[in-house]
Image (spheres, helix red, strand yellow):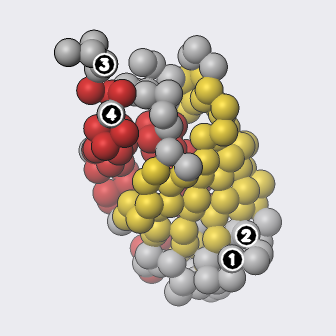
């Protein structure tokens, strides 16, 4: 035996990160779907649904739904990072909303964990609809990391 823990295995880290998303009741209730999970980043999509709309007159998805999507995607990026997090929690998440998401379109969040210290991971994330050249929102965050 080489003394490596299961968390040292990249495939095991991806499995743990996938479970992290699947066990969050709020993520399941919103209909989040994990599309990409790798040490380089994570992508989660959220189909447009009428019950997620914040303004019935415009059909625009609620900003809180976008926030939850970006937070979940960011946490998953921390869990998939090679640093081998066993768990994580949001310390701080700053979101800049740039425009309303187009009604009827799926929203996708992409996140990358770009720096990890002994106990904190730093993440960048973006949310977009079909027009990827114009993000709906951008975020930066800090997350706890337990190894």
Q: Position of residue 93 (x, y in %)?
A: 66, 39
Q: CA distance from mark 2 to mark 4?
A: 34 Å
Q: Position of residue 50 (x, y in %)?
A: 45, 80
Q: Mark 3 packing: few (<14 Cα in 10 Å), some, or many (20+)?
A: few
Q: Which mark is residue 135?
A: 2
Disc 3 or 2, which lies upstream in sequence?
3
Disc 3 or 1, which lies upstream in sequence?
3
- Label 3 sits on residue: 4
Identify which residue is drawn at 39% across, 60% down: 34
Q: Helix or strand or loop: what does disc 2 sit on?
A: loop
- Label 4 sits on residue: 9
Mark 1 vs mark 4, foreground winner is 4
Q: Mark 1 packing: few (<14 Cα in 10 Å), some, or many (20+)?
A: few
Q: CA distance from mark 4 to mark 3?
A: 8 Å
- Label 1 sits on residue: 132
Asked if the residue under mark 1 is in contact with the one under mark 2, i.e. CB atoms within 8 Å, the reply is yes
């Amino acid at each position: 035996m080489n003394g490596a823990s299961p968390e040292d295995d990249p495939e095991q880290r991806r499995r743990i990160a996938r479970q992290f998303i699947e066990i969050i009741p709020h993520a399941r209730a919103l209909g989040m779907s994990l599309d990409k999970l790798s040490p380089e980043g994570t992508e989660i999509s959220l189909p447009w649904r009428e019950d997620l709309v914040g303004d019935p007159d415009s059909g625009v998805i609620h900003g809180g739904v976008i926030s939850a999507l970006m937070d979940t995607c960011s946490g998953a990026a921390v869990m998939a990072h090679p640093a081998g997090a066993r768990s994580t929690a949001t310390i701080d998440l700053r979101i800049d909303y740039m425009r309303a998401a187009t009604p009827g379109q799926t929203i996708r969040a992409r996140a990358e964990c770009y720096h990890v210290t002994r106990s904190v991971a730093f993440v960048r994330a973006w949310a977009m609809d079909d027009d990827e050249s114009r993000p709906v929102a951008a975020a930066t965050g800090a997350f706890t990391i337990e190894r």
